[in-house]
Amino acid sequence: MTSKIFKVGTFNLFNLILPNVPYYENRRYSPEEFAKKKSWIAHQLNGMNADIVGFQEVFHVEALQQALDESGSYRHAKLLAPTRTGESPIVALVSRFPVLDHRVIEVFPAKAQLDVDGVIIPFNRFSRAVLSVDLALTEHLKCTVFVVHLKSKRPIFPDDIDRNDPVEKAKGQVRALIQRAAEATALRAILMEFLQGQAHPVILMGDINDGGLAVTSQIVSGEPPFHKMQFERKTELWDVLLYNVKDIQARRSYGDFYYTHIHNGHYESLDHIMVSQEFVSENPDRVGRVNYVSVFNDHLMDQTLSRDGVELWQSDHGQVVAAIELGR
């Protein structure tokens, strides 16, 4: 790329699966619906024009490749995804930058194991494997990008349980919350290996299934130091923080129109891009800075106000794009 600005984006595709293949509750796309979905994804990708895109809810990588081909914007790009597809959704990444290496992380690191009063929390795997990719942004600048999709808020029920029982529903929501928190903790442990003392640019993107101020989101990003802390201690914490591009833009603008999902009248930001301090303008040793953030959410509909809804061939999430300017 000749430009000093590159773009990164996150895109929840909402059940991208080949036509006539059954998925949840025996749903399936007709060939006509799949063609519409593929064309809509291609249209969104061309509007985003991101050099790196992280995807969620990919059932078939070949379906994503067809959408990329239809967009025409990623002819020379590299598409990466875990090899196992079809049975359950996975994440993926496409990059116009050279790919140096990649890792698929399914199992929690040992140090992320949780216990309460000596009782082990029985979660030790990600519901969707994490994809970690090393990219060459320039000849001398390398970056690691993580694509994630944490456990949703959908309740987890045991078999033969009355799912309409209010108490059982509450318990199911707690199980989902515990699993998402466990995944966030494991992700934080993995991130520390790339952040702490490394001076290495890191970008994390994906569907975290929580707002930016939620506990699970802050587990992933880390919390900023208290303003009265000693400077040396602040420096240690800044080194291991991730910064949400939503907050970076909010500090520089009076407007806040950031939402990526609407559920029962609630406008939520579930999809996030986070960057390490190497891309934060306040850092004197930065290698670049977040320049601008865009949210592609015009297709989302509030069904408490309108009879119209999101079409099956669209996504029920908005897409987020962050432009990053290299250099100081």
Image: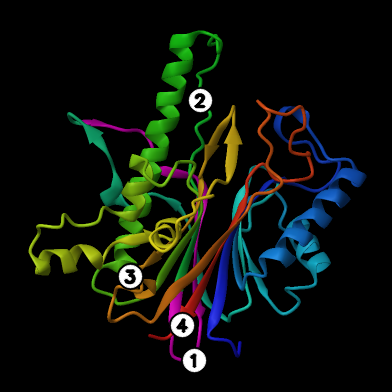
Residue, x 71% and y 64% (percent of image)? Answer: 47
Rendered position, 119 above or below 139: above
Residues at marks 1 and 2, CA–CA distance in whole angstroms: 46 Å
Residues at marks 3 and 2, CA–CA distance in whole angstroms: 35 Å
Residue, x 54% and y 80% (percent of image)? Answer: 5
* Residue 20 location (% of width, % of height): 86, 41
Residue 326's mark? Answer: 4
The residue wearing badge 1 is 139
The residue wearing badge 2 is 155
Residues at marks 1 and 3, CA–CA distance in whole angstroms: 21 Å
The three-letter amino acid code for the residue at tag 2 is Pro
Nearest the eye: 282 or 201: 282
Task: Count neighbours of disc 2 (C-alpha within 10 A) and say few if under 14, some if 14 to 19, many if 20 or more.
Answer: some
* Residue 106 location (% of width, % of height): 47, 51
Residue, x 73% and y 59% (percent of image)? Answer: 44
Residues at marks 4 and 3, CA–CA distance in whole angstroms: 13 Å
Q: Is residue 26 left or right of residue 164?
A: right
Local SS, label 2: loop
Nearest the eye: 109 or 19: 19
Image quadrant holding the N terminus, namely bottom right
Does any portion of residue 62 appear in the rendered image? no
